[in-house]
Image (spheres, rainbow, N blue to C red):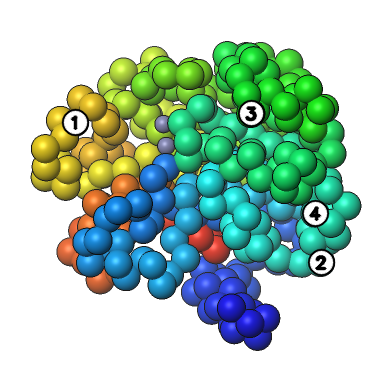
Amino acid sequence: MTSSTRREFLGAMLATAGWPLVSQNEMFALMLGSVQDGGLPQIGCYTERCENARHLHRFITSLALVEPAAERFYLVDATPDLTRQIDLIPGVAFRRRAQARRPFDGIFLTHAHIGHYAGLAQLGREGLGMGRTPCFCSPAMAEYLSTNGPWSLLVDEERLFFPEVPLNEWYSVSESLSVRLIPVPHRHEFSDTVAFAFRTRNRSLLYVPDIDRWEDWDIAVQDIVREVDVALIDGAFYSLAEVPGRPIEEIPHPLIPHSMDLLQDAVRDGSRVIFTHMNNTNPALDAGSAEEAEVRRRGFELARAGLRIAL
Ligand SMILES: [Zn+2]
Ligand SMILES: [Zn+2]
């Protein structure tokens, strides 16, 4: 892509994402992607959706938290698409930081499934060669990264370190950002899983990209969604029919219509709920599909890379 077509592409993406709605100096979250760990297109998948996506940029679920005035930048989940995703972060300050090998003031990781941390590989010496950066995750995730290669090299070379963050309590990252790590029931393979609640001086944001079942959580999703201004939640599948031949027990996630049923009252009362982490089989990914229309009709939203959320 030439630099002028790249600017056009980014410009179009940001314009459709409501770019002018956020004031210059206000902190914001920027969606860097919105699809499930396997990405879109997914390897070896030649459905119409994946074929079309070979020409688009639909990245795996991730967020940047950007504080323009203080020139602070945080990454929430490090996906295999990270190299191209960080190009969505606007402004010369971030590029200056990246060139100085200190792009992020902190990296938040939910868990050890590939879509959420494998991008760390690009931050080691073969890639960006990142300087010492705090990583906020559960103790089990920190232990996993510290004791398993190649991730342990990032720790041994002091690129990543893990501040002690108590679970379920507000932790002050800076004078303008606090985070709460909330354990979530999700396939426990290499680590456990957390959701993040972020709080700034003005607003709050919940990020739950993966959960097995809302009903397995010791928190009522309706309550936590009502506590925050914006909730970004697991929208992996729309219906069971999407994944023929694979039992849902193998890949458990709440279905979007079920989540809408649970959260309809909260949305009617003004809560903002955005589905993310959509699997490549999910028809809600298709602009103009009946499923996309139904989500919007019910007052919910679907995440897209480039979407800005004022914080
Ligand atoms: Zn995931
Ligand atoms: Zn997962």
Reading the image, the residue beneath label 3 is: 150
* Helix, strand or loop at mark 2: helix
Question: How far apart, in angstroms, are the residues tagged by discs 2 and 1?
Answer: 45 Å
* Helix, strand or loop at mark 4: helix
CB atoms at circles 1 and 4 under 8 Å apart?
no
Where is residue 187? Give x, y as percent.
Answer: 36, 21
Q: Residue type at mark 3?
A: Pro
Q: Earlier in the sequence, mark 2 or mark 4?
A: 2
Where is residue 282? Give x, y as percent.
Answer: 25, 52
Reading the image, the residue beneath label 2 is: 92
CB atoms at circles 2 and 4 under 8 Å apart?
no
Assess disc 4: are there few (<14), some (14-19) or many (≥20) residues with their C-alpha within 10 Å of its C-alpha.
some
- Which residue is at a point 82% across and 27% down the rendered structure image? 158
Q: Earlier in the sequence, mark 2 or mark 1?
A: 2
Q: Earlier in the sequence, mark 3 or mark 4?
A: 4
- Which residue is at a point 37% across and 39% down the rendered structure image? 234
Q: Residue type at mark 1?
A: Ile
Q: Residue type at mark 2?
A: Val
Reading the image, the residue beneath label 1 is: 248
Query: Taking 11 as reference, is 139 above or below it?
Result: above
* Helix, strand or loop at mark 1: helix
Question: How far apart, in angstroms, are the residues tagged by discs 2 and 4?
Answer: 10 Å
Which of labels 3 and 4 is toward the front? 3
Query: Taking 252 as reference, is 6 above or below it?
Result: below
Question: How far apart, in angstroms, are the residues tagged by discs 3 and 4?
Answer: 22 Å
Reading the image, the residue beneath label 4 is: 98
Left/right of residue 261 with respect to residue 125 in the rendered view:
left
- Which residue is at a point 54% across and 44% down the rendered structure image? 79
Question: How far apart, in angstroms, are the residues tagged by discs 3 and 2?
Answer: 31 Å
CB atoms at circles 1 and 3 under 8 Å apart?
no
- Which residue is at a point 44% across and 61% down the rendered structure image? 58
Give ligand 1's quarter of the image.
top left
